[in-house]
């Protein structure tokens, strides 16, 4: 575990004044619960790497720990700090954060999700001029946003927040209607992705590369998903749906067609042993590959036939955008901001189903795979929508404009 820099050891020499000047980039401190693989962390890395280093430099602070994901952030002048928060309530972590902020003297504190929102209190006491809070998705204990304690916490701390950033229209509507955030404080910024990294497969690309035996062979139909293996992603629902799909395909077309189906789950997490055991109980283990963390996610996705998201809740999931950029048709649960991402010019892209309903998910996957024309059309239209609306550069520009606008009102 990394320790925060002690007060007498600045991370990059002398700490400059908070204000911006042509020779003094503004310091933005980004506060996350844990810096690890995930959609929120990928958005943060893209923002940091995309902002002009002549205007901004960055400190990434994790309440718990900083993992090897730090290597994903390649911008210059980035310092990393882990505060070692204990499990449960740990009031001392906020004292450590206050001390660190007093030492770093950032112009902006950027908190991400409810787990870090309390950081605006030590930031206020440390004299951080601008405090911006981003909502990328609700907590796993508050999937629909109805948790009274969390709602009250947000309401109590809103006076210390200068601007709130929801990443989906669903979150924006909830913040306005349920949390009662003043509309003037809300600044909607949609997530964006690297469209060059996530691209459609070229005709000459081999499907088998990177896949274990039996998964990249000609004739296989590969259903894939990407995400951390934890409860809110509900991979168990996907496994059950895949088992139902195989049974239905065998009933309709025979065992040969059933054996062509494959499920690839890209990701890792605490539920991996449980999901592996479930696949065995469902008698689908021979057709399921749980990959663990991979550095070649974009390559693996280019070999899917269909992308599936089975979550119980989402904000604005990057994996859906990445699938669309890869020209993959999408079947997903109708949660959070997913429907907004799949809102095409001529109606809904992909197929949406209720959460936690394996029969509905299996039926949607079956209809998709049975219609090659639909698969091809949805892939093309999804790629076009990403190119038009969800580029990384557009997202970075929105954060740049927000940071500069707030600084102009607070920092001389």
Image (cartoon, rainbow, N blue to C red):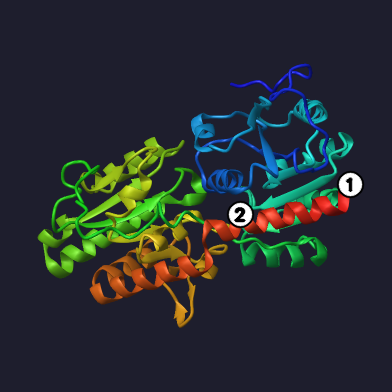
Residue drawn at (36%, 58%) of the image: 199
Residue 33 located left or right of residue 311: right
Residue drawn at (70%, 21%) of the image: 5
* Residue nearer the viewer, 38 or 145: 38
Q: Quadrant of residue 302?
A: bottom left
Q: Position of residue 55 (x, y in %)?
A: 70, 45
Residue 409 located left or right of residue 290: right
Q: Quadrant of residue 383?
A: bottom left
Q: How many marks?
A: 2
Q: Earlier in the sequence, mark 2 or mark 1?
A: 2
Which label sits on residue 104?
none
Q: Which residue is mark 1?
A: 412
Which residue in the rendered view is the most extreme toward the bottom?
Answer: 346
Q: Position of residue 334 (x, y in %)?
A: 50, 66
Which label sits on residue 396?
2
Badge 2 element: helix
Mark 1, Cα crowd under 10 Å, few <14 / some 14-19 / many 20+, is few
Q: Quadrant of residue 49?
A: top right
- Quadrant in the picture for the N terminus: top right
72 over 50 or under it: above or below: above
Residue 332 located left or right of residue 126: left
Which residue in the rendered view is the most extreme toward the front?
Answer: 22
351 over 97 or under it: above or below: below
Residue 146 appears in the picture as rendered: no
Residue 397 appears in the picture as rendered: yes
Q: Position of residue 188 (x, y in %)?
A: 68, 63
80 over 310 or under it: above or below: above
* Residue nearer the viewer, 339 or 301: 301
User: Are dots 2 and 1 in contact, CB under 8 Å?
Assistant: no
Q: CA distance from mark 2 to mark 1?
A: 24 Å
* Residue nearer the viewer, 210 or 157: 210
Q: Position of residue 215 (x, y in %)?
A: 20, 48
């Amino acid at each position: 575990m990394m320790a925060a820099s002690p007060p007498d050891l600045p991370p990059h020499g002398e700490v400059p004044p908070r204000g911006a000047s042509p020779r003094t980039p503004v310091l933005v401190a980004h506060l996350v619960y844990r810096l690890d693989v995930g959609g929120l962390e990928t958005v943060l890395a893209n923002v940091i790497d995309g902002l002009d280093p002549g205007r901004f430099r960055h400190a990434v602070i994790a309440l718990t720990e900083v993992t090897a994901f730090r290597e994903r952030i390649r911008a210059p002048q980035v310092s990393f700090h882990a505060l070692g928060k204990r499990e449960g309530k740990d009031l001392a972590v906020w004292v450590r954060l206050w001390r660190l902020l007093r030492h770093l003297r950032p112009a902006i504190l950027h908190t991400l999700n409810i787990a870090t929102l309390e950081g605006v209190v030590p930031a206020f006491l440390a004299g951080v001029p601008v405090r911006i809070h981003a909502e990328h998705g609700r907590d796993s204990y508050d999937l629909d946003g109805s948790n009274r304690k969390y709602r009250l916490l947000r309401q109590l701390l809103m006076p210390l927040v200068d601007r709130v950033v929801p990443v989906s229209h669903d979150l924006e509507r909830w913040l306005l209607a349920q949390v009662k955030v003043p509309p003037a404080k809300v600044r909607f910024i949609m997530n964006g992705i690297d469209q060059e990294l996530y691209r459609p497969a070229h005709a000459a690309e081999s499907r088998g590369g990177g896949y274990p035996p039996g998964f990249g062979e000609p004739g296989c139909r590969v259903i894939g998903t990407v995400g951390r293996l934890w409860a809110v992603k509900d991979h168990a629902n996907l496994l059950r749906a895949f088992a139902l799909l195989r049974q239905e395909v065998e009933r309709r077309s025979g065992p040969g067609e059933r054996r062509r189906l494959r499920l690839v789950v890209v990701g890792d997490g605490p539920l991996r042993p449980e999901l592996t055991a479930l696949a065995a109980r469902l008698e689908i283990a021979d057709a399921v590959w749980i990959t663990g963390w991979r550095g070649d996610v974009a390559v693996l996705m280019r070999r899917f036939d269909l992308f599936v998201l089975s979550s119980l809740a989402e904000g604005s999931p990057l994996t859906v955008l990445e699938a669309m950029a890869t020209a993959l048709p999408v079947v997903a649960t109708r949660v959070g901001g997913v429907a907004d991402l799949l809102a095409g010019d001529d109606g809904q892209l992909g197929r949406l189903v209720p959460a936690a309903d394996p029969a509905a998910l299996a039926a949607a996957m079956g209809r998709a795979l049975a219609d090659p024309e639909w698969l091809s059309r949805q892939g093309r239209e999804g790629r076009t929508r990403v190119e038009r609306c969800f580029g990384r550069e557009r997202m970075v520009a929105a954060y740049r404009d927000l940071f500069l606008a707030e600084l102009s009102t607070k920092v001389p």
